[in-house]
Amino acid sequence: MSLILGLDIGSSSVIAGLLRGPKVVAESPRAFFKSKHSGSAVEVDPATLLAAVRTAIAGLGPRVRQVDSIVFATMGPAWVAMDRQGRPLTAIITHQDRRSIVEARELEARLGKDRHLALCGCRPFPGGISSTSWAWYRRHHPSALRRADLVGHLNTFLHRQLTGARVIDPSNASFTGLFDTMTLSGWNAELCANLGIDSRLLPEVLDADVIAGTITSAAAMEYGLRAGTPVMTGLMDGSAGMLFTGAAVGQLFNVVGSTDVLALCTDRPKPHERLLTRALGVGGKWLQVSTLAAMASSIYWARDQFFPEMPVADFQAEFRRLSRVGAKAAGSVVFEPYMAGERTSLEQRQGAFTGLTLASTRTNLLSAIIEGLTRASADRLPLLEATGTKLLRTVAVSGGSDRLDQLMHRDWRGPWKYRAVTDATMRGLGLLTPRER
């Protein structure tokens, strides 16, 4: 069985792994990088991210020069513009960025809400698709784009650095807001015209398992790799995780962490204005996705703000107790769980407490957070059921530290079974078999 180098590039770190099929032979320590937060803008310096990639690869030692192929899973959307030599002209604009609300409204107003939804599979949500970021840059920093020769997502940028190729996979293409997601037929002329861009700036769309290029001599020296090693196009991290579950039609995959992502695999996508619809990236399937942008991070925030003196073990015990007690522990307090905004809304909602009185305690507030999150988790199921795809009753679950997965599933109605999967993104990459174009 061939040896694959997998790169898992998330929102704050890079992990490199050696894979034989879904078996992880070796894995590097996490190489962390920081995002720059400025108001509603969230971006990553490209040089900083590339340094983290080099560090992660180096963490595996000389065996990386013996791999048969390379593939990466990336956060997304992660938009970036490049010049003719592949050098970045902009920062990498991440999925946490919400600065382009005005541009999103304008894009939808020009094309029409229903038309945009039908073509793209999503409304132009800031942080959900990247055409709004492109529009923001054109308005606020037009000089940065005058020398643009290629515009894409993070896997486009990585390929340009490592292989010189100009490519993107269908999962990332879907989240540009310019791809004909519902038919997987390529860049959509109507969506491109609505943004006012030349489609020649866009990369070629290839399935995730296609060999898009090979490691150049310069990249081999810089990253400690072997020149000529084939590199597959790659795909989004959530897609790699779904591949590891088997990617059966109707499969639910729930990633429980700082952000809570619930994805449904389907072969018949039905656009919904409160869901993100995108290609899986390989095999002619799609994912329909609902996200809670701040799940565990809301709980950690509550611990830091309301219980700073309490030992972590005692806080966890109190948290578990309140989870069992239910809504009565919140009293009259109600929490809206939008501490990091909302990825399926043009208008960015914010977290809020209502029902506060002079009798309200920090325990009431923590309980209200628990109840708000569990309610929001359960409310996603009717949205996914409305797509018409029959949901399989066994849910693949990744993450769930501190048993948060049990909390988030507490109020799901119906007979559900939960199957824990570990290291799903990395192991999913190992299931991709490289093939020629």
Image: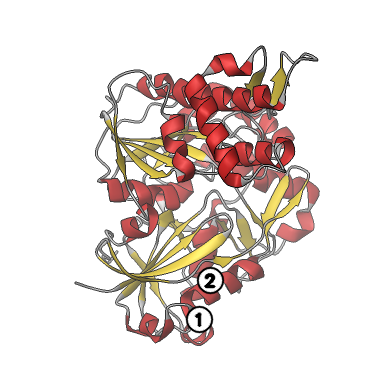
Location of residue 29 with respect to 269 vertically, above or below: below
User: Which quarter of the rendering shows the C terminus?
Assistant: bottom left
User: Could you tell me which secondary element the residue under label 1 belongs to?
Assistant: helix
Q: Looking at this view, is 195 or 21 the one in front? A: 21
**In the figure, is residue 378 to the left or right of 90?**
left
Mark 1–mark 2 CB contact (< 8 Å): yes
Q: Residue at x 55, y 48 (%)?
A: 77
- Does residue 174 appear in this view? no
**In the figure, is residue 380 to the left or right of 268?**
right
User: Which quarter of the rendering shows the N terminus?
Assistant: bottom left
Location of residue 37 with respect to 269 vertically, above or below: below
Q: Amino acid at mark 1?
A: Tyr
Q: Quadrant of residue 299?
A: top right
Residue 134 x/y as whole percent = 66, 48
Q: Residues within 10 Å of mark 2 (few under 14, many from 20)?
A: many
Location of residue 18 with respect to 238 vertically, above or below: below
* Visual colour scheme: secondary structure
Q: CA distance from mark 1 to mark 2?
A: 8 Å
Residue 405 x/y as whole percent = 43, 37
Residue 400 x/y as whole percent = 44, 43
User: Could you tell me which secondary element the residue under label 2 belongs to?
Assistant: helix
Res 53 label: 2
Q: Looking at this view, is 60 or 191 the one in front? A: 60
User: In the rendered structure, which disc, 1 or 2, sits on the residue that comes first in sequence?
Assistant: 2
**In the figure, is residue 239 to the left or right of 47?**
left
Q: Quadrant of residue 101?
A: top right
Q: Residue at x 71, y 21 (%)?
A: 353
Q: Amino acid at mark 2?
A: Val
Residue 380 x/y as whole percent = 45, 24
Q: Residue at x 32, y 62 (%)?
A: 210
- Does residue 55 appear in this view? yes
Q: Which residue is mark 1?
A: 223
